Image (cartoon, rainbow, N blue to C red):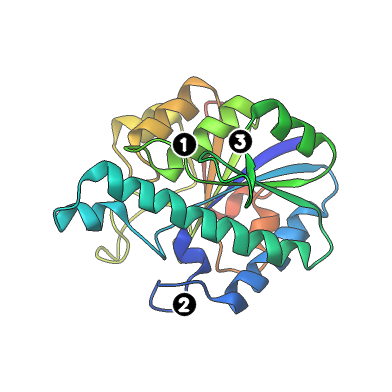
Amino acid sequence: MRRVVLKLSGEALAYQDSKGIDHLKVKKLAKEIKDLYELGDIQLCIVVGGGNIWRGRDAELSGMERSSADYMGMLATILNALALQNAIEALGLETRAMTSLSIPSVAEPYIRRKALSHLEKGRIVIFGGGNGIPFFSTDTTAALRSAELGCNLILMAKNGVDGVYDSDPRINKNAKRYTRLTHKELLENNLHVMDLTAATLCSENNIDIIVFDMNVKGNIKKAVDDFSIGTLITNKKE
């Protein structure tokens, strides 16, 4: 069995203006996740962000203390995790939502051995609440959970971006898309795939990352096998 982490931004669940939870979009995303799960050899973890509801760095700009802003962001990720959980279960799949912040009446607390047990029983595990401490992004959560749970691949689903480029393709029409990078190249060139803490964790633990456009139908399922749809970041030789 292959154990993978699907990393979703909060905006993946949002309305067109990147705000709120668009239930139609969540249902569509759940169907794509079901297609991935039904490959049959996948143990699936999902880490979801909260930027559609709250962005800590925006609050910081308004003068809010950073820790408080980050905790609010963690709560936003839990709302998204619950929305996604219900949409996936409506399709007949079994899930567990686990949170780094203790909200026992809403979701299970994250316990590594319990998460492993759920995965081995074929349940999709959805992580909310980030790492449970401020100053870390949900990218870091994806990397940390991958390392803790023995996941060897992160599916880094992007909204409308089909890989890693040497410059912003929205500004530079001649921007080059990489098909393959090493973790060292990712870090040395400061390519903005994920924050540096997350990238370093992936590098040190030999966790591959595939960056792809989740808005193309079928790409979430394809991403585990067909790396040509995006950019693969790996320490493995070709």
Q: Is residue 223 left or right of residue 215?
A: right
Q: Amino acid at mark 3?
A: Tyr
Picture coordinates of residue 157 (x, y %)?
Answer: 53, 55
Q: At 79% from the left edge and 46% from the top edge, which residue is drawn?
A: 123
Q: Is residue 156 left or right of residue 178?
A: right
Disc 1 and disc 2 in contact, CB within 8 angstroms? no
Of callouts 3 and 1, which one flags the residue occurring earlier in the amino acid sequence?
3
Q: How far is mark 3 from mark 1, CA to CA?
A: 10 Å
Vertical placement of residue 160 versus 207, above or below? below
Q: Which mark is residue 131?
A: 1
> At numbered mark 2, what does the secondary structure look like: helix, strand or loop?
loop
Q: Amino acid at mark 2?
A: Tyr
Disc 3 and disc 1 in contact, CB within 8 angstroms? no
Please give the residue where the numbered disc 3 appears in the rendered image: 110
Identify the image quadrant of the N terminus: top right
Picture coordinates of residue 111 (x, y %)?
Answer: 64, 30
The one nearer the camera, 43 or 192, is 43
Q: Is residue 56 left or right of residue 130?
A: left
Picture coordinates of residue 73 (x, y %)?
Answer: 39, 52
Q: Is residue 229 left or right of residue 59?
A: right
Closer to the observer: label 2 or label 3? 3
Identify the image quadrant of the C terminus: top right
Vertical placement of residue 3 versus 50, above or below? above
Of callouts 1 and 2, which one flags the residue occurring earlier in the amino acid sequence?
2
Whether residue 203 is visible, yes or no, is yes
Of callouts 2 and 3, which one flags the residue occurring earlier in the amino acid sequence?
2
Q: At 37% from the left edge and 52% from the top edge, which residue is drawn?
A: 72
Please give the residue where the numbered disc 2 appears in the rendered image: 15
Closer to the observer: label 1 or label 2? 1
Disc 2 packing (10 Å; few <14; some 14–19; many ≥20): some
Whether residue 177 is visible, yes or no, is no
> At numbered mark 1, what does the secondary structure look like: helix, strand or loop?
loop
